[in-house]
Amino acid sequence: MPNVRVAQTDDREAVTAVVSAAFADDPAWSFLLGDDYDELAPLFAGALFDTRVSTGGVWVTSDVAAVAMWEPLGGDTPRPVGSEQIWKAYRAVVDVPTWERLCAYERAVDSVRPSTPYWYLGVLACRPERQGEGLATAVMTPVLQRADGEGVGCCLETSTSSNKLFYERRGFTQATPVHIASGPPTWWLARHPQAR
């Protein structure tokens, strides 16, 4: 199993590069960022990183070839401190249609989120040339194990059938369609806590 660790703020540049490369052909990110993907992907990935790194929810391989960005959600769990300012800064650099697509996407996902506590995997990315080495599974594992120990489920959404199969093999077997106006087919996937 590859070595993994909790990401630090100085991993930001490497993480945004990995995420931008990994999602270059992703239908959801193409929908969200449009024709400005190359310019906006690092900014979007950076915002996602910034909202999670202070909580210890970002895990990377030792060489930062793969990253998992988690956050605990549901119940009374508040959003990370400073997230409003981070998204306000992102909104200031994108055009109105790009921001509106993000809001529509979030509303659609919110409509299927459970009300009970769960761990949310917001981003799982691996350098394209390193896929197949078990790196993505490795960076997911610490939080999956923690969730199992806590008796809490894990959730995520994906817009590719190949990713859906990848997650199903890792226990995300409950799939709910997410209807995004003018957006790609998307599924909300849930994983129940696994017995040890």
Image (spheres, rainbow, N blue to C red):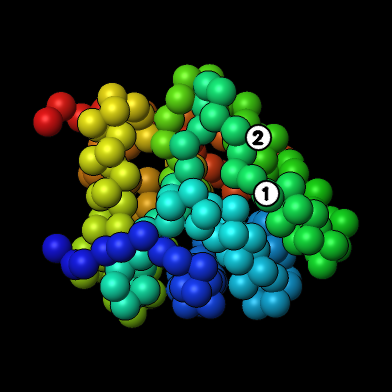
Q: Residue at x 78, y 61 (%)?
A: 89
The first of marks 1 and 2 along the sequence is 1
115 relative position to 104: left or right: left
Which residue is identified by label 1?
83
Q: Residue at x 50, y 57 (%)?
A: 53
- Quadrant in which residue 91 is drawn: bottom right
Disc nearest the viewer among 1 and 2: 1
Q: Residue at x 56, y 23 (%)?
A: 76
Amino acid type of the residue tagged 2 in the rendering = Ala
Number of labels in the image equals: 2
Which residue is identified by label 2?
108
Element marked by disc 2: helix
Give the numbered dot on residue 141.
none
Compared with 175, 166 (above or below) is: below
Q: Position of residue 165 (x, y in %)?
A: 31, 47
120 relative position to 193: left or right: right
Q: Is residue 41 visible?
A: no
Q: Position of residue 97 (x, y in %)?
A: 84, 56
Q: Quadrant of the N terminus?
A: bottom left
- Residues marked 1 and 2 touching at CB (< 8 Å): no
Q: Residue at x 79, y 54 (%)?
A: 88
Q: Quadrant of the C terminus?
A: top left
Element marked by disc 1: helix
Amino acid type of the residue tagged 1 in the rendering = Ser
- Nearer to us in this view, 163 or 72: 72
Q: Position of residue 5 (x, y in %)?
A: 30, 63
Q: Residue furthest right?
A: 96
121 relative position to 77: left or right: left
Q: Is residue 52 visible?
A: yes
